[in-house]
Image (cartoon, helix red, strand yellow):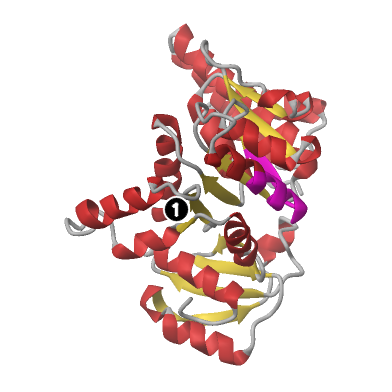
């Protein structure tokens, strides 16, 4: 629905009036406040005297995000899992076979697959998921073909020039992640994902670290974290609960699907964290959650709440049951555990 936007945006009342007239002529009726701010930002950048190269970056980034939004919009309500892994993985390797099987199993469970659109693990994932269930989020590289193995239809091949807009798309559109062995790019994507989860910049999501049978890539990574990072207090031991390490495709798929068996989504409303559920929890389960996770509640308790007015205004999952807590905004790995406990039906999972 439209929202009021009375205060000045460009710093010039005459320009503000022109912006409002432009928006009216364009026929924009939803989120007028945000569209106004976006146009005002462009006006300010144009008046600030930035170098042409700076403006080209901003322009390209906005274009890439717009194209991404348009490609994903028809599939907004369908869960998607990103598969990360090396472009160099050969077709006859156990990792390639496992990634293909991972794509197939997730597609059978009504998930779509997002990959980087390149060869190796990325092509394996879309081979398994199939043409109707795959997205390619590609990056322009001079030495590597990034066309989804020729499987992904063009309308779901989202092409990027910049890594930062591509990464944003991965995180924004994905509800789960499966990380196969890979090089710097795979580690970069995985570490950034874990950083966003650890700091609360990304909502809790299931993250699978997949070691192909007989390989120890992620086991070795986990041991490095335990030996080098945890003892120096560089990460918390609880942060390892953000990931699930496995060598079984079925176990990985179960972990991803179970995460959303009861949990739907979350958002902040007037300073409280609201958890939306697919089904209500019992009084006993609520009490168990309060006992188990009192350490991350700044004050009060985890309680059932009604849909807030702001959620009603946004048409945001308005019919789902809700819980709310005054989260301490610090222990996000513990919050991840709370979500898993919701879906498992027991605290302490």
Q: Is residue 213 above or below residue 122?
A: below
Q: Residue at x 66, y 71 (%)?
A: 262
**Relative to the observer, which residue lies in front, 66 or 213?**
213
- At a point 57% along the width and 92% down the height, the residue shown is 284
Residue at the image position 63 percent from the left and 35 percent from the top: 124
Residue at image mark 1 = 197
In the displayed orientation, state which residue is furthest to the bottom: 284
Judge by depth and name the residue closer to the eye, 202 or 95. 95
265 vs 186, nearest the viewer: 186
Residue 40, quarter of picture: top right
Query: In which quadrant of the rendered view does residue 112 lie?
Result: top right
Q: Which residues are magenta?
A: 101-114
In the image, is residue 324 part of the stretch drawn in magenta? no
Position above or below: 127 against 306: above
Indicate the position of residue 302 as horizontal and vertical percent values: 51, 80
Indicate whether 201 appears above or below 63.
Answer: below
> Percent position (x, y) of residue 79?
70, 51
Q: Is residue 110 magenta?
A: yes
What's the residue at 41%, 32% (across, down)?
183
Mark 1 lies on a secondary structure that is: helix
């Amino acid at each position: 629905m439209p929202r009021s936007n009375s205060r000045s945006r460009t710093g010039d009342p005459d320009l503000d009036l022109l912006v409002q007239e432009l928006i009216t002529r364009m026929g924009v009726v939803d989120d007028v406040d945000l569209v106004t701010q976006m146009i005002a930002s462009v006006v300010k950048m144009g008046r600030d005297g930035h170098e042409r190269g700076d403006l080209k970056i901003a322009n390209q980034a906005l274009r890439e995000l717009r194209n991404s939004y348009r490609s994903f919009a028809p599939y907004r309500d369908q869960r998607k899992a990103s598969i990360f892994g090396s472009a160099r993985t050969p077709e006859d390797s156990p990792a390639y076979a496992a990634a293909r099987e991972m794509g197939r199993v997730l597609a059978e469970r009504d998930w779509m697959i997002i990959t980087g659109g390149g060869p190796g693990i990325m092509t394996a994932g879309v081979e398994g998921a199939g043409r109707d269930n795959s997205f390619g989020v590609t990056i322009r590289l001079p030495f590597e073909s990034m066309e989804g193995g020729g499987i992904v239809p063009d309308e779901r091949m989202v092409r990027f020039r910049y890594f930062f807009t591509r990464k944003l798309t991965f995180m924004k559109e994905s509800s789960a992640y499966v990380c196969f062995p890979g090089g710097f790019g795979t580690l970069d994507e995985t570490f950034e994902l874990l950083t966003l989860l650890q700091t609360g910049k990304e909502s809790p999501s299931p993250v699978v670290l997949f070691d192909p049978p007989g390989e120890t890539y992620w086991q070795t990574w986990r041991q490095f974290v335990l030996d080098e990072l945890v003892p120096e207090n560089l990460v918390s031991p609880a942060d390892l609960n953000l990931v699930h390490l496995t060598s079984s495709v079925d176990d990985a798929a179960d972990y991803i699907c179970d995460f959303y068996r009861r949990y739907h989504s979350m958002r902040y409303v007037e300073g409280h964290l609201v958890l939306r559920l697919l089904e209500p929890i019992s009084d006993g389960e609520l009490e168990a959650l309060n006992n188990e996770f009192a350490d991350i509640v700044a004050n009060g308790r985890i309680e059932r709440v009604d849909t807030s007015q702001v959620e009603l205004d946004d048409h945001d999952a308005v019919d789902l049951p809700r819980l709310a807590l005054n989260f301490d905004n610090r222990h996000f790995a513990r919050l991840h555990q709370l979500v898993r406990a919701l879906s498992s039906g027991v605290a302490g999972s």
